[in-house]
Image (tube, rainbow, N blue to C red):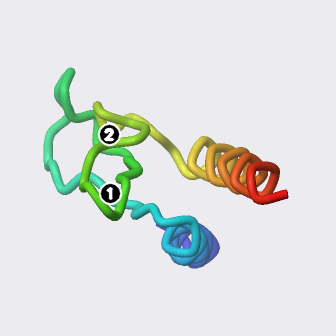
Amino acid sequence: MTNSDKARENAYRRQAIRLGLALRKSRARHWSIDDQGGYYILDAATGGVVLGSRRELDLDKVGEYLEKYGRELRAKAE
C-alpha cells in the first residue's frame, strides 16, 4: 500500500464517520469466496454491513459509495 492509498483510506474513514458509517478492511490472510480481502462499510449505529458483505470493495468503490450516500443524505435534509 502506497502512502497515497493510505491517505485516501484515512480520508474515507473520516468521511464515513461523518456520515454515520464505518469503513473496515478485511484482516484475512487468504482470499476466499466469502472474504476477498478488501473493504466493507458498516452502519455505525447497528454494526450491520451496508456494502461489501464479501469484503470485495476497493478504494475507488468506497469513494463512489460515500459520495453517493452523502448526496442522498443532503437531499433528504433539504
The numbered dot on residue 69 is none
Label 1 sits on what residue type?
A: Lys
Residue 8 image point, x, y percent = 61, 70
Q: Residue at x 56, y 52 (%)?
A: 59
Q: Are marks 1 and 2 in contact (CB under 8 Å)?
A: yes
Neighbour class for label 2 at 10 Å: few (<14), some, many (≥20)? many
- Please name whichever residue, 48 or 8, is drawn nearer the observer in this view of the structure: 48
Residue 64 image point, x, y percent = 69, 45
Question: Does residue 30 appear left or right of residue 41 in this picture?
Answer: left
Answer with the quarter of the image where residue 25 lies. Answer: bottom left
Question: Does residue 5 appear left or right of residue 17 in this picture?
Answer: right
Residue 45 image point, x, y percent = 32, 62
Label 2 sits on what residue type?
A: Arg
Q: Quadrant of the C terminus?
A: bottom right
Q: Residue at x 14, y 49 (%)?
A: 29
Query: Which element type, helix, strand or loop, lies under badge 1?
Result: strand
Residue farthest toward the front in the current orientation of the protein: 78
- Please name whichever residue, 66 or 78, is drawn nearer the observer in this view of the structure: 78
Q: Earlier in the sequence, mark 1 or mark 2?
A: 1
The numbered dot on residue 25 is 1
Q: Is residue 45 above or below residue 4?
A: above
Answer with the quarter of the image where residue 49 lies. Answer: top left
Residue placed under numbered mark 2 in the picture: 55
Q: Residue at x 37, y 54 (%)?
A: 43
Question: Does residue 7 appear left or right of residue 50 in this picture?
Answer: right
